[in-house]
Amino acid sequence: MTTAAGPVEVTAPRVNDKRVDAATGERMRFSSKILPPWCRKSPKVSEVLPLLYLHGLSSGDFVSALEQFLGSAAGLSSATVTRLTKQWQDDHAAFQQRGLAESDYVYVWADGVHPKVRLGQAHSCVLVLMSVRLDGTKELIALAEGLRESTESWADLLRDCRRRGMRDPELVVGDGAMGLWKALAEVFPAARHQRCWVHKARNVTNALPKSAQPGATKAMQEIYNAEDRAHAKKAIEAFARTYGAKWPKAVAKITDDAEELLAFYDFPAERWIHLRTTNPIESTFSTVKLRTKVTRGAGSPAAALAMVFKLVESAQARWRAVTEVHLVALVRAGATFENGVLVEREAAA
């Protein structure tokens, strides 16, 4: 029997054993409580194998990598590992069907990411929704395959979340993909929109020559690092004066979305650094992309998506709750924040 400590020799009683109980005179029947007939390895080893596969070890390499450690190649075939990964797909299906009515999502990050796995179509991506709950903990809401981050794909995912009980979040942070914002306005019309500054800065610099990019990057930092909305708007005007004459398209990317780029000023200042970008998703999936690089041939679109889900689920265990949790509750309760500071309501006369 293969165990985490090495192979253990176990002798199972034979079915045709004719030994007789001395007290009753009846033939004794044996049923092993240690080694079930179907079991070739301990449950702990069964858990480790798919985990190693997720972390980049090819299923064909298990024998050479683990035979010396476990003392035997029994139960280490690629077919065995593939059968074990079926559980990931079942876990992901159950995750996508769970009820959301008991969870109150106040802030939501939304993004479409492209891990190095084979999905259903050439232009497919993984649509991700992450959140901060009312109690300050971070949680993965949904993860599904989508096509080009289209309005239809986002709308299907958001409608499914609404059907399972999700209410309108206070703020949704996402990139410039128009499909997300159109779907969001249809399904969760009460949610405020915040454009991601990391994606926006990348799009602006791509519209500028290399010689102008360092200065433009610094000028954009002056906008989203401004102490309040008024100074941020002045920084936008300065950006337009500096670059508008030569590169109007680059400037329009900022001026056309100014309100949605500055929406974070209406929320607690303690959250600004988290609410103006989709970095919570980006940082999580940077690890996912590295680990799926080796195992990009996942076998099927369902297996690929399940692999990504299990990696994110593993990372979720290490997500830290936000500080100043009471501010999250205040935002959900409808408190007003001006330039990040709570506006005290005057007591009724």
Image (cartoon, rainbow, N blue to C red):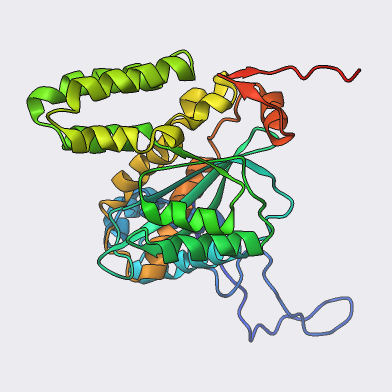
- Percent coordinates x, y for residue 165 in the rendering: 69, 58
Q: Is residue 113 above or below residue 215?
A: below
Q: Is residue 242 above or below residue 312?
A: above
- Percent coordinates x, y for residue 117 in the rendering: 30, 59
Give the left or right position of residue 20, taking residue 191 as reference: right
- Percent coordinates x, y for residue 299 in the rendering: 32, 70
The residue that appears at 55% across and 74% down in the rendered structure is 38
Residue toward you, 52 or 19: 52
Q: Quadrant of residue 17?
A: bottom right
The residue that appears at 26% across and 51% down in the rendered structure is 293
Res 294 seen here:
yes
Give the left or right position of residue 273, taking residue 72 as reference: right
The residue that appears at 69% across and 45% down in the rendered structure is 104
- Percent coordinates x, y for residue 30 in the rendering: 71, 76
Residue toward you, 9 or 163: 163
Location of the C terminus by quadrant is: top right
Give the left or right position of residue 86, taking residue 165 as reference: left
Residue toward you, 274 or 99: 274
Q: Quadrant of residue 201?
A: top left
The residue that appears at 51% across and 62% down in the rendered structure is 157
Res 49 seen here:
no
Residue toward you, 189 or 79: 189
Return the residue found at the far right. Answer: 349
Q: How many marks?
A: 0
